[in-house]
Image (tube, grey):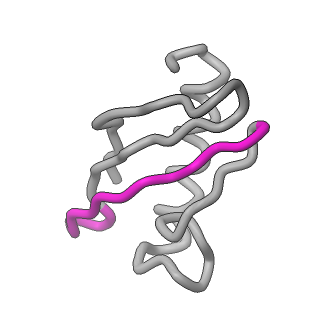
Amino acid sequence: MHVYVVDFAWHGNQTLFIELKGTDYNRKFEGMVRVVDGIIYGDLVHPTKSTLSKEAITYIKNYVSEQISAKKF
């Protein structure tokens, strides 16, 4: 599994949009997540709307949380 940030943008003080690319079991993906008050949203990580594996969804959420904690945005 591999994930990286392509781009990001803040909308106000509380909403962060992050464009991601990566691989899920050698299958490429790209998409966007929205972070509001530390909660990660978006079809990319939605349990029923995403085409990614549950492991990839968990990995992306953990990766984004770690990047936020490290103040990368």
Quadrant housing residue 37: top right
Which of these two is toward me, 8 or 55? 8
User: Could you tell me which residue is drawn at 59 percent across and 14 percent down?
Assistant: 71
Task: Specify the segment rendered in magenta.
Answer: 24-37
Quadrant housing residue 36: top right
User: Could you tell me which residue is drawn at 37 percent across and 45 percent down?
Assistant: 19
From the viewer's perspective, is residue 43 above or below residue 56?
below
Question: How many numbered marks does the figure carry?
Answer: 0
Q: Is residue 29 magenta?
A: yes
Q: Residue furthest top?
A: 71
User: Could you tell me which residue is drawn at 42 percent across and 54 percent down?
Assistant: 32
From the viewer's perspective, is residue 18 above or below residue 67?
below
Residue 4: x, y in percent? Answer: 33, 38
Which secondary structure class fits the magenta region best? strand
Which of these two is toward me, 41 or 47? 41
Quadrant housing residue 48: bottom right
Which of these two is toward me, 1 or 31? 31
User: Could you tell me which residue is drawn at 65 percent across and 28 percent down?
Assistant: 12
Q: Residue furthest front?
A: 12
Q: Is residue 10 magenta?
A: no
Residue 30: x, y in percent? Answer: 29, 58
Q: Residue furthest right?
A: 37
Residue 18: x, y in percent? Answer: 45, 41
From the viewer's perspective, is residue 67 above or below residue 32?
above
Residue 39: x, y in percent? Answer: 74, 47
